[in-house]
Image (cartoon, rainbow, N blue to C red):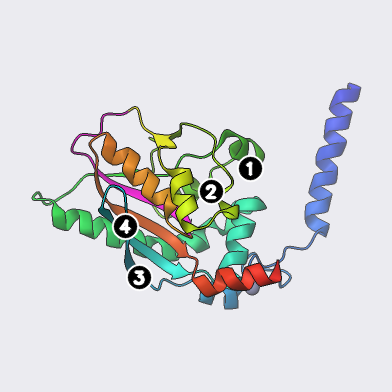
Amino acid sequence: MSSETIREWVANACREALSLVLPVSCAGCGELDYNLCPACQAVLVPELQYRELFDPVAKLRLPLWYSMELTQVSSSVLHEFKEQGRTSVAKHLARPFVSALQAAYAAGSAESSSTSVHITWVVPPSSRANFRQRGYVPITVLAQAAGVRPQRLLVNTRRRVDQSVLGRMERFENMRGSFRTNKNLDGRSVIILDDVLTTGATLQECARALRAEGANVIGAAVLAYTPKNFQDTRRKNA
Ligand SMILES: [Zn+2]
């Protein structure tokens, strides 16, 4: 055995031993010995809601369906899923997400004259740095767990200021013109997918870029909406 092979063998053995010793804790509340405890699973249920985003420049509405409002538990599960590599909770998040997907799909079908409408599911562009860091694109993993195969038709055209430091209108202006697609989408019915909605600036920029290439944007399906008081609480805690 070469020293390289031995080192690799020892590293693997250590990792395996650690996985037996290190306790699993609930992604929602931290309770030991659960990936997601029954109480937290019971919180992740669909409470489908509808609203419309308005693009003040294009004067267009973007229909939007979201599955639930962000709470401490869902926020914690999403954080573990997106930032801590816990892709094992995707199936628990997919369960409520399906309701928003179905509602958006139903709206697409209602618009169509034929019985079966073909929908193209699109996700916002992800930065290369984020992908390198995580090794996966969370919204793609979530969408697949919910049973659809999203396409990455959109790319970033330029760098943006970190949205979290900006106000609502500034976010909108910061985003505007920052996505594009090279595909001709003439007549394609498109639904945009995302995990969390805060101001909607990202979704509106997706819609603008898709419409610019001829897409018929049915609307957006989002897992969780961040209610205003939730943002305020977080800011106070920060
Ligand atoms: Zn829990």
Which mark is first along the chain, 2 or 3? Answer: 3
Which mark is first along the chain, 4 or 3? Answer: 3
Q: Front-most of 168 and 178?
A: 168
Q: Quadrant of ligand 1?
A: bottom right
Respond yes or no on whether mark 2 lies under 8 Å from ligand 1.
no
Quarter holding the N terminus is top right
Which residue is labeled 4 in the image? 54
Which residue is labeled 2 in the image? 138
* Residue farthest along the left direction in this orientation: 113
Report x, y in % for residue 140.
Answer: 47, 45
**Disc 3 residue type?**
Gln
| Badge 3 vs badge 4, beta-carbon distance below 8 Å | no
Q: Residue at x 62, y 65 (%)?
A: 76
Label of residue 134 in the image: 1
Q: Residue at x 54, y 40 (%)?
A: 160
| Badge 2 vs badge 4, beta-carbon distance below 8 Å | no
| Badge 2 vs badge 1, beta-carbon distance below 8 Å | yes
**Disc 1 residue type?**
Arg
Q: Is residue 143 visible?
A: no
| Badge 3 vs badge 2, beta-carbon distance below 8 Å | no
Q: Is residue 115 left or right of residue 206?
A: left
Which mark is first along the chain, 4 or 2? Answer: 4
Image depth: mark 3 or mark 2 in front: 3
**Disc 4 residue type?**
Phe
| Badge 4 vs badge 1, beta-carbon distance below 8 Å | no
Q: Residue at x 22, y 59 (%)?
A: 106
Q: Residues within 10 Å of mark 3 (few under 14, many from 20)?
A: some
Question: Which segment is the magenta one?
Answer: 183-197
